C-alpha cells in the first residue's frame, strides 16, 4: 500500500520551487519600486502645490499693497482739495473788507494830496489804515493766499485776469494791462478771485 501512495504523491522539483520564489520576489520588488515612485511623485506634487500657493499669496499681497497705496494717495489729494476749497470760500467772504481798506487808503491819500498841509490827525489815520492793510495781508500769507501780480504794463493772462475794458495806449504794448480795477488773489495754483483789469491795444 505504501508503494501505491508513493505513486500517487508527487512533490515539486527543486527548480520549480526556486522559480516560484524568484517570481514572487520580482513582483514584490516591482511593487516596492512603484510605491516609492508614487510617493516621490506625490511629494513633488505637494511641493508644486505649496509653491503655487506661495505665488498666489505674493500676488495678493502686491495687489493689496498697490490698492492701499492708491487709496492713501487719493485720500490725501481729497483732503488737500477739501482744505483748499474751504480756504477759498472763507477768503472770498472777507476780500470785500480788504477792498474797502484799499479804497479808504486811496481816498485819504487823495484828500491829503489836495490839501496844502497835512495835519497830524490825518497822518495817524493813514498810518492806522496802512497797519490794518498789512495785518490783513499777513493773515492771507499765513494761509498761502497771495495777491496776483497785476500792475500797469503787466502782460494780460486770462487765467489770472478778467478784462472788462479795452483801451488804446501808445505807451503800452499789445495785451498789456492799462489799469487795475480790483485786485486778484490766488491760493497756490488755484485762483480765489481774478484781477479785474483794463487791457491796452
Image (cartoon, rainbow, N blue to C red):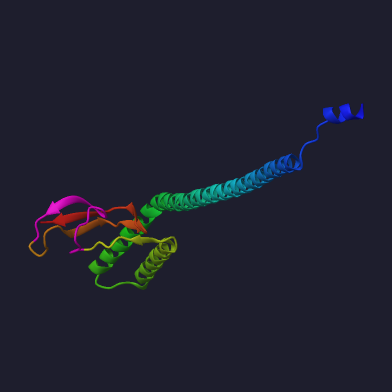
In the picture, residue 2 is in which quadrant?
A: top right
- Percent x, y of residue 90: 43, 51
- Percent x, y of residue 177: 18, 59
Is residue 61 highlighted in magenta?
no
Q: Is residue 97 left or right of residue 195?
A: right
Question: Which quadrant of the figure contains the N terminus?
Answer: top right
Is residue 156 highlighted in magenta?
yes
In the picture, residue 138 is in which quadrant?
A: bottom left
Compare residues 183 and 186 and report the one nearer the observer. Answer: 186
- Percent x, y of residue 29: 68, 46
| Residue 154 to residue 7: above or below | below
Name the residue furthest right: 1
Q: Is residue 91 left or right of residue 158?
A: right
Q: Is residue 54 left or right of residue 80?
A: right
Label tally: 0
Compare residues 185 and 9 and report the one nearer the observer. Answer: 9
Name the residue furthest left: 170
Residue at horizontal 16%, vertical 55%? 199
| Residue 190 to residue 6: above or below | below
Compare residues 126 and 18 and report the one nearer the observer. Answer: 18
Residue at horizontal 77%, vertical 36%? 12
What's drawn in magenta, residue-wise? Answer: 152-169
Q: Is residue 12 left or right of residue 84?
A: right
Amino acid at each position: 500500500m505504501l508503494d501505491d501512495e508513493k505513486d500517487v504523491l508527487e512533490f515539486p522539483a527543486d527548480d520549480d520551487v526556486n522559480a516560484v520564489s524568484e517570481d514572487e520576489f520580482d513582483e514584490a520588488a516591482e511593487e516596492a519600486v512603484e510605491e516609492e515612485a508614487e510617493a516621490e511623485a506625490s511629494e513633488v506634487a505637494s511641493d508644486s502645490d505649496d509653491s503655487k500657493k506661495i505665488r498666489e499669496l505674493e500676488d495678493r499681497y502686491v495687489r493689496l499693497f498697490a490698492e492701499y497705496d492708491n487709496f492713501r494717495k487719493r485720500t490725501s489729494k481729497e483732503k488737500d482739495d477739501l482744505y483748499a476749497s474751504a480756504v477759498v470760500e472763507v477768503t472770498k467772504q472777507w476780500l470785500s473788507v480788504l477792498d474797502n481798506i484799499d479804497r479808504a487808503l486811496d481816498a485819504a491819500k487823495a484828500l491829503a494830496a489836495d490839501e496844502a498841509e497835512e495835519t497830524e490827525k490825518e497822518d495817524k489815520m493813514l498810518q492806522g489804515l496802512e497797519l490794518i492793510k498789512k495785518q490783513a495781508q499777513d493773515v492771507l500769507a499765513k494761509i498761502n493766499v497771495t495777491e496776483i501780480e497785476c500792475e500797469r504794463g503787466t502782460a494780460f493772462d486770462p487765467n489770472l485776469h478778467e478784462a472788462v475794458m479795452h483801451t488804446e495806449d501808445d505807451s503800452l504794448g499789445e495785451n498789456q494791462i492799462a489799469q487795475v480795477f480790483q485786485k486778484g488773489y490766488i491760493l497756490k495754483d488755484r485762483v480765489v478771485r481774478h484781477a479785474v483789469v483794463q487791457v491796452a491795444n
